[in-house]
Image (cartoon, rainbow, N blue to C red):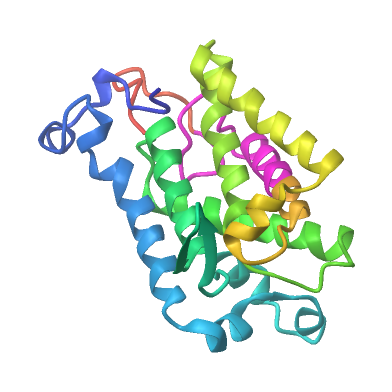
Amino acid sequence: MITNVSEPSARTASENSSGGNSPWLDWQVWGAPLALMLLIGLLGLGGEPWIDALRYDRVAIAAGEWWRLITGNFMHLPGNTIEWQGLRFHGPFHLFLNELGVLVLVLLCPERLPALVWLRRLLLLGLGMSLGLYFFAPQLRWYVGLSGVMHGLFLLGLLPQALKKDIVALGCLLYLLGKLGYELYAGAPVSDEAAIGGKVALDSHLWGAISGFVYGLLFRAYRQPERWAFWRPAPDSKNPGQL
């Protein structure tokens, strides 16, 4: 499943040298996601002091520490111990699951996007999700994790393909929406909370998905490749596929 891949008429020499038509060898597909994985991995090395300083914290945000609306999305719970068939494993499983989520996102929805578009998506989806928590989930005192933003990113990646009648994308999108509905009705599975070592903030998944949907409408990301420019210039008749 390939999303937002440039048309052949827009292909340049640099694109040919980075993998031609194949998104799997293109640095524009993998560069930003790998940088994101590296970032959250490095932040995880800071342990609980960094978590306390950067997590979404309702009281601290109300006191003026507004940056937590963004930084909390990139922090994760510290390592925990899980048991499986009598074996005990200890590690940063919350971080691992979100690292894995980024990989799955790229494999399902490889997009050749400028780094600035990736940055804009992460910042605006993170901000939208956190504001949703702040105004509509007052019972949530603090939160860490990328899963809310990931729900928005998956929606942005899957919906354009579903609109093109991609059966795999449509199935994944229906699963995502069904998962959200089930979580709102029945709550998070106990196994999920045991795996990450904490309570799953289901509201973050909902507001992350809502933020992703609204973002896609604002930046017209569902019908054509997303660009950094908010307003799209008229197509160039000589280069109709140029970004």
Tell me if residue 218 is in the magenta stretch. Answer: yes
Nearer the observer, 236 or 108: 108
Q: If the image is split into quadrants, where does the N terminus sit?
A: top left
- Name the residue located 25 percent from the left edge and 19 percent from the top edge: 9
**Up-down relation of residue 45 to residue 158 (above or below):** below
Which span is picked out in magenta?
208-232
Estimate the x, y position of residue 114 in percent, counting from the top left.
37, 46
Q: Is residue 169 above or below residue 192?
A: above
Q: Which residue is pictured at 67% across the width and 58% down the height?
A: 193
Q: Which one is in front, 170 or 28?
A: 170
Q: Quadrant of residue 77?
A: bottom right
Q: Residue at x 82, y 67 (%)?
A: 140
* Relative horizontal placement of residue 121, taking residue 103 as reference (left or right): right
31 versus 131 height, above or below: above
> Percent position (x, y) of residue 28?
29, 43
Q: Is residue 59 magenta?
A: no
Q: Is residue 114 visible?
A: yes
- Quadrant location of the C terminus in the rendered image: top left
Q: Position of residue 200 (x, y in %)?
A: 71, 58
Examine the rendering and report whether any part of residue 110 can be seen.
Answer: no
The structure residue drawn at horizontal position 32% and vertical position 41%, both measured from the top left corner, is 29
Frontmost residue, 10 versus 46: 46
Whole-percent x, y for residue 143 in the image: 70, 68
